[in-house]
Image (cartoon, rainbow, N blue to C red):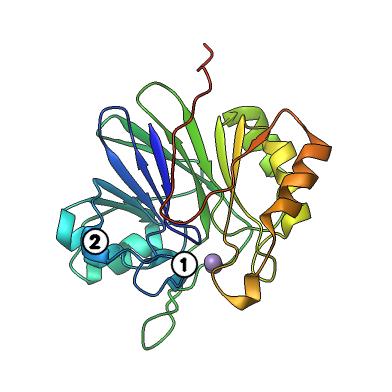
Amino acid sequence: MEIRWLGHSAFQIISDEGVKILIDPFISNNPACPLPVEDLDANIICITHGHSDHFGDAMEIANNTNATLIANHEISLFLGEQGFDCIGMNTGGSVSVLGITITMLDAKHSSSIDFTEEVIPGGNPGSFIITMEDGTKIFHAGDTGLFSDLENVVGKIFKPDIAMVPIGDRFTMDPFQGALASMWINPKVVIPMHYNTFPAIEQDPAIFNNFVKQLNPNIQVVIMNPLEYYKPDFEKED
Ligand code: NI
Ligand code: MN
């Protein structure tokens, strides 16, 4: 498996079997992502919530690639009105596509579809557990503040191997809260996201790294540059 950060909260995950999963594909208006939208390939596109910096170029990429769109019920209705097939789901549910299981969990945030002429309610914001063919679990936290289910549900029940956690402050957790969330989620690897895209969310990821090291030195912090690939090298247990 390989994970590629596209800046902000956008990630491309390429499974061992070659399935390409895009999460929150904010590309063309993303100052941290120099890649042209046409260059992105996907089989599955997951959208955590309706905000433009997460919904992003989902429709154009789905048009280009025929990827399966996955989002909450309200966003799937909106996509349906735009002529797209979308698998709608809601908190606690799972769907399986091409051998990949996607589970929607909570996020403490909002989810309006904010890029249309009139703002449309976009249901509840979510996060995703993505279970790969070999059982490796990746948690993408979406946009969120700190809340105790990150420990009680994500950490204790789902036990992800890898977590992507926002640290930008202003709209989400800051580096300290992100480190607390990492301790609660307790993954093998944590990747910070949703920072340094715009001046409002400027952060030094080294500060996040220091907090995580103090709270739980067993968690490996992987700080990525946009367009960089990360190949997990931990051994999968059980
Ligand atoms: Ni948001
Ligand atoms: Mn956001």
Q: Vertically, is 216 above or below 13? A: above
Q: Which residue corresponds to the image point at 37% horizontal and 64% vertical from the top-left?
A: 75
Disc 1: which residue: 32
**Residue 139 appears in the figure:** yes
Q: Decide: is 48 above or below 186.
A: below
Which corner quadrant holds the N terminus? top left
Query: Label 2 is placed on what type of residue?
Result: Ile
Q: Are marks 2 and 1 in contact (CB under 8 Å)?
A: no
Q: Quadrant of residue 38?
A: bottom left
Name the foreground residue: 13 vs 171. 13
Mark 2 and mark 1: span between their CA atoms?
18 Å
> In front: 73, or 106?
106
Q: Nearer the viewer, mark 2 or mark 1?
A: 1
Mark number displayed over residue 61: 2
Q: Amino acid under label 1? A: Ala
Q: Quadrant of residue 50?
A: bottom left
Helix, strand or loop status at disc 1: loop
For marks 2 and 1 on the same chain, the one whose residue lies earlier in the sequence: 1
Considering depth in this image, is 233 or 103 the residue closer to the camera? 233
Q: Pick whichever, 21 or 205, lies toward us.
A: 205
Total residue callouts: 2
- Taking 217 as reference, is 81 left or right? left
Task: Determine crowd level at label 2: few under 14, some 14-19, many 20+ residues with C-alpha closer than 10 A.
Answer: many
Residue 51 in sight: no
Percent x, y for residue 187? 63, 32
Measured as percent of width and height from the top left, residue 181 is found at 71, 45
Q: Quadrant of ligand 2?
A: bottom right
Please state the horizontal and vertical placement of residue 218, each as a whole percent of the image: 72, 27
At mark 2, the secondary structure is: helix
Task: Name the mark on residue 217.
Answer: none
